[in-house]
Amino acid sequence: MARLESEIQRRIIQRLEADGWYVVKLILTNRPGIPDLMALKNGKAFFVEVKRPGQRARELQEYRMKELRGIGFECEVWTE
């Protein structure tokens, strides 16, 4: 049975928080397509787009990650 994206997201948040990251779930922002999670630690931030295994980021999501990378932030698509 395929796992829900919400279950995968919950596990990712738990793993990041266990590693000392402060994780913010980004919901209904003024920028559609922004990654699902923002992780903060030691003055650094990175963004995570959560997908089920085999899924890819949509075109707008890829565009937003490119924007964020362009201003110096790390962005990744995670499936686990």
Image: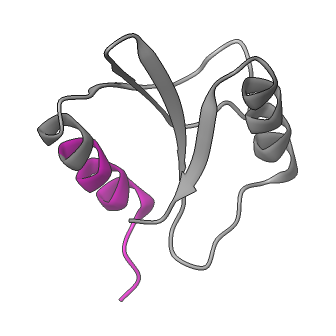
The boundaries of the magenta stretch are 1-14
Residue at 70%, 65% in the rendered image: 56
> Would you say the magenta stretch is mainly helix, strand or loop?
helix
Q: Is residue 26 visible?
A: no
Q: Nearer the viewer, residue 68 or 31?
A: 68
**Residue 11 included in the magenta stretch of the image:** yes
Q: Nearer the viewer, residue 53 or 44?
A: 44
Q: Is residue 64 visible?
A: yes
Above or below: residue 43 compared with residue 47: above
Residue at 35%, 60% in the rendered image: 8
Quadrant including the N terminus: bottom left
Q: Residue furthest left?
A: 18
49 left or right of 24?
right
18 left or right of 60?
left
Residue 2: image quadrant is bottom left
Residue at 58%, 21% in the rendered image: 28
Q: Nearer the viewer, residue 60 or 73?
A: 73
Quadrant including the C terminus: bottom left
Residue at 44%, 18% in the rendered image: 44
